[in-house]
Every structure is written in structure tokens, then in C-alpha cells.
Image (cartoon, grey):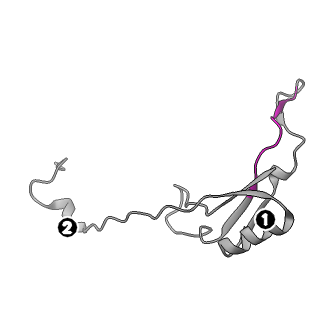
Amino acid sequence: MTARIYKPTKSAMQSGLGRTKDWVLEHEQEAAREVDPLMGWTSSGDTKQQLKLTFETKEEAIAYAVRTGLAYTLEEPQQRKTVRKAYADNFKFGRIGAWTH
């Protein structure tokens, strides 16, 4: 069984960077999900995929995986590209996609 260690990205529904500073250890799915014939719900007997552990640093997450004997894959976060913009750029002459009223 393998575990995935990653740093979560911010969701599209939030503007801040809350809950993106910790590292997460998440177990990969071992067995395929099954469809319940009566209700049509999907279910699985694998309860480890519901477990999500958070750590303050990457080294703590790796140490936990090594200590418990878990094989793990590490996903490094990509750096965000910030584009500096000024409010006045919305009104400058000759901009692409000019706004008209």
C-alpha cells in the first residue's frame, strides 16, 4: 500500500491561503469501489482511504511514513506565478479587449 504526501493547493472558492501551509499524507485506494445493487451508492471496504493526516513539515510526514513502514510518493508543490497588476491598467489607451460603454 502506498501513501501520497503533498501540500494542498488553494481551492477556487477561496482567496486566501488558509489550509495550504500543512503537508498531507493520504493513503491511496487499494480496492475498487463497488456499486450497491439496492441503493446504487458506491462503497468500499478499504477504510484507510478515508484517513488524511496533516503535518507541519515535509520531513515530519516522511518520517511518519518511514516509521510505520508505508511506501510513499512525494509530490513537491509548484510555485505560484504572480502577475503584478495595477488598477489603472484597466483604463489605459489601446489595451487588448478594450472595455466600452
Magenta highlight on residue 72:
no
Front in this rendered view, residue 86 or 50? 50
Q: Position of residue 21 (x, y in %)?
A: 60, 72
Is 6 situated left or right of 14 in this image? right
In the rendering, which numbered label is found on residue 65?
1
Up-down relation of residue 59 to residue 92 (above or below): below
Magenta highlight on residue 31:
yes
Name the residue type under label 2. Ala
Is 63 situated left or right of 57 in this image? right
Q: Residues within 10 Å of mark 2 (few under 14, many from 20)?
A: few
Magenta highlight range:
26-36
Up-down relation of residue 55 to residue 73 (above or below): below
Q: Earlier in the sequence, mark 1 or mark 2?
A: 1
Q: Position of residue 34 (x, y in %)?
A: 84, 31
Q: Position of residue 46 (x, y in %)?
A: 87, 45
Front in this rendered view, residue 29 or 67? 67
> Which residue was labeled with disc 2?
88
Q: Which image quadrant is residue 31 in?
A: top right
